[in-house]
Image (cartoon, helix red, strand yellow):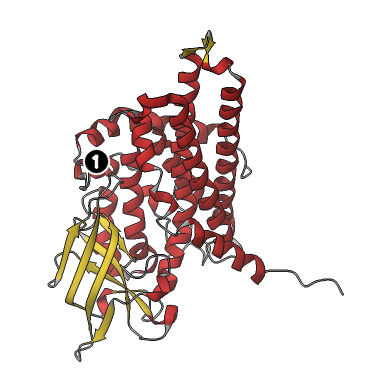
Amino acid sequence: MTAFSLNPEQTARCAELRTLAAERLRPLAEKGEPGHVNRPLVAELGELGLLDCLFEERGASGEQPGEGAGVRARGAGALDLCLMRESLAYACTEAETALALQGLGAHPVHAHGSAAQRERWLPPVRAGHAVAAFALSEPGAGSDAAALSLAAERDGSGGWRLTGEKCWISNAPEADFYSVFARTSPGAGSRGVTAFLVPADRAGLTGTPLDMLSPHPIGALAFDGVRVDGDDVLGEVDRGFRVAMTTLNRFRPSVGAFAVGMAQSALDATLAHTAERTAFGGTLKDLQSVGHQVAEMATRTEAARLMVYAAAAAYDREGPQSPGIARRAAMAKLIATETAQYVVDAAVQLHGARALRRGHLLEHLYREVRAPRIYEGASEVQRTIIAKELYAHQEEPPA
């Protein structure tokens, strides 16, 4: 298999996922309350075994594939994750987002947590019984993740006290635990951040929901001397920025897959609409301007899909620490999210006012498609990553 084609088994799996999303997940999503965690939906994702595919198998020594001799579980590779997210997004964006947030929040525990942390939290996450969240962004440190100010101060008894705020945190304040990134060494930039696993019931931790355009839950967290100790550290002290970046590199291509799924859904709706809608003595598809617009939408969607698949295949083949993986991940997220914004907007334009009515597929996608260009690294951040990677690996000019 190459990065640019799917085998029959993968194609069949994508079709199966679309059917599952439409028949079993969408009805649960429709019963959910916007802005709140839909626990029945998360539980169904676990019941269907879909949450298992978020996690790579670890080797006997606890190493990750690409870092040691571990063997992946079937369906747990980055490409498989992209196919899953794209397929779910096509039929039920709420299910896709619920699945992705479980992965984002729990991946630091899976990849960097202790055996005790993994045994305590990962089984209920995979079963859909515990909700995870990734708490990185702050009111003054969104795109500039190395500028975190949530303070972790030594308390004299071998632990720390967390004081400060987190903001724009998906699944907050309703998650059961948070992967939290705090500053343990002031003035050290990215080298002074530590990742902690913080259960939601920890004393001093409170949260507030935020009323956002996107329908999934997003909130702010306040830490008032929340105590953590060595058993709560994810990875190593002062090495938490690596935990955050490896998590984002793992999921960035699949954010692109989410976007591709939305773009394809909007494109298919547009093909059906323009083939049936009559105007100016014929159907819309007979107008050259409409045909050219649809062709552009389709071409951009396919180009984005191929870049997502290529980035994911490279991650699976070479491992998360290989040169070029961060650049590929950034490129995939950038082109896919920007493309989805273009395709959904063009679809709305070709549908006209009906697409702006509450409850219409495109009205829903129009609200959903905007946020991915910001979260997990805004488009501007992706361009910065790409440029830095290009110059860092620039070949020496010929003598």
Q: Disc 1 designates what residue?
A: 41
Q: Residue at x 21, y 57 (%)?
A: 175
Where, quadrant-wise, is the N terminus in this rendering? top right
**Where does residue 172 sit, x and y in percent of width and height?**
23, 57
Q: Nearer the viewer, residue 46 or 364?
A: 364
**Where does residue 316 sit, x and y in percent of width and height?**
54, 54
Among all residues in the image, which is located at the extreme top? 281
What kind of residue is marked 1?
Leu
Q: Nearer the viewer, residue 12 or 271?
A: 271
Q: Is residue 267 above or below residue 86?
A: above
Q: Is residue 286 above or below residue 126?
A: above
Q: Residue at x 18, y 64 (%)?
A: 200
**Toward which corner of the image does residue 24 lie, by quadrant?**
top left
Q: Is residue 139 above or below residue 33?
A: below
In the image, 102: left or right of 348?
left
Asked if residue 233 shows in the view, the reply is yes
Asked if residue 62 shows in the view, the reply is no
**Where does residue 352 sit, x and y in percent of width and height?**
41, 25
**Where does residue 261 sit, x and y in percent of width and height?**
45, 38
Where, quadrant-wise, is the C terminus in this rendering? bottom right
Among all residues in the image, which is located at the extreme bottom? 156
**Toward which corner of the image does residue 290 lie, by quadrant?**
top right
SS at badge 1: helix
Among all residues in the image, which is located at the extreme front? 280
**Count the marks: how many?**
1
**Toward which corner of the image does residue 147 lie, by quadrant?**
bottom left
Q: Nearer the viewer, residue 350 or 141?
A: 350
In the image, 165: left or right of 148?
left
